Amino acid sequence: MNDALLKSQFFIYGCLVATFVWILWTHYKRDSSKTEKKKRPRMQQYFRDEMQPVFPNGWIPLILSSELEINKVKSLNIMGEELVVFRTQDGVAHVMDAYCPHLGANLGVMGRVVGDCIECPFHGWRFRGEDGVCTHVPYASKHPEFVKAKTWISKEAYGLLLAWYHADGQEPTWDVIEHQEITSGQWKRTGLYDKQIFGYMQDITENGADVHHFSQIHKSSSFVGPEEYERVAGDSWACRVMTFDYDIKWSEHGVKVCISTDLQVKLFGWKVLSYHVELWQLGPGFTIAHATSPFGNLFYVFSFTPHGPRHNQIYHVLSLPQFGRDIIIWDHKTFLKNPALVKEDATIKSFRKWYSQFYSSKSPTWRDVREKTVDW
């Protein structure tokens, strides 16, 4: 009798798994068939409040460490700044202003690494990665040591090259400390998600404090990709196969905030699994998450790189279909400085007060950036 019951249970679970795999494959194919290049929404080109700061202070992710091999040079445009990043032969990554202080050539375009320096492609001047000091001029009897290229304080953690940015020029006041399991190689990256987002950086990171959006756009099945979810507005039988219930708690801790939840997973309304998730946002655009379940632990990192006031790049170790739903919203929303909130939205108000610590008197506004360049 027990054997028959066990076999029937295995059969039922097998059918459920097969059904879910079929749903996942069907919707994956439907979503992945759309390969149109993403365009910036027209309404995202302007701010309602021209004096709103657009670039926060702190440790800002620039690129993946794996993108910068030894002797590799890359040109970047981040936070309205033209930068050059390069890795010298000792394996150390460096960040400098892109333009050579001699005659303004871009060191990131045809520049090359020579020893512990980067060499300008225009006249061969070399600048030491550690401090930007000029160490060599090929046609001069003496190199001008008083000439320096501006260097940026940088470090590598969680597989990312980070640079310290502060509009008022202050030195780092806090640090990003990598988990020992990652430093030692015990935990390794198993996936990567890279996406361009057209939204305001503060608005995007406010998502975790907006605790009530989870039950609105993240309740329905993960089997439904973002394009399909947008098409049916989250209302279809596929969205109802698997659902999630959240119990979100938000708290602040200095330069960090914590979002924790006990997540209940339901199939056809029946609870089948629960797991605990903690997300720690460290500074203005860097988040570490840890999920624990009966099947094991999951550790992941996602970060935001502000290329422009409303142009961000996100690096995420997992490609989560549900995250794409947020991107659809971000790409088409505007930031309201004084939103209409109810008392249950208290965490949003708290988040904005917390986030304000990453702005200073000289933090560039939308007007500042617009006047500096026409690229936005």
Image: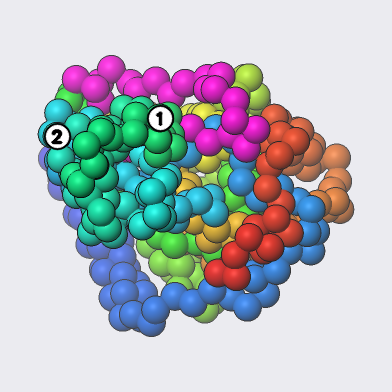
Is 178 magenta? The answer is yes
Q: Residue at x 46, y 67 (%)?
A: 226
Amino acid carrying label 1: it is: Phe
Colour convention: rainbow
User: From the viewer's perspective, is 72 left or right of 94?
Assistant: left
If the image is split into quadrants, where does the C terminus sit? bottom right
275 left or right of 18 in image: right
Q: Is residue 317 magenta?
A: no
Q: Are marks 2 and 1 in contact (CB under 8 Å)?
A: no
- Find disc 1 in the rendering and name its residue: 146
Question: Would you name the residue on which mark 2 appears?
Answer: 115
On screen, residue 148 above or below 75 = above
Give the image location of residue 151, x and y in percent: 41, 35
Tag 1: Cα neighbours inside 10 Å, few (<14), some, or many (≥20)? few
Residue at 19% over, 32% down: 116
Q: Secondary structure at mark 2?
A: loop
Identify the amino acid type marked 2.
Gly
Disc 2 crowd, CA 10 A, few/some/many (<14, 14-19, 20+)? some
Rendering coords of residue 109 (x, y %): 28, 59
Question: What residue is drawn where x is 55% and y is 69%?
Answer: 375
Report x, y in % for residue 70.
14, 40
Q: Residue most toward the front?
A: 141
Residue 202 visible at all: yes
Q: Is label 2 or label 1 in front?
A: 1
Q: Is residue 237 above or below residue 158?
A: below
Left or right, 158 with respect to 42, comes to left
The residue range painted magenta reads: 156-184
**Whether residue 248 can be seen here:** no
Judged from the image, the secondary structure of the residue bearing numbered disc 1 is: loop
Q: Say which residue appears at 31% left-offset and 54% top-offset.
A: 108
Can you say whether 243 is above or below 250 in the image?
below
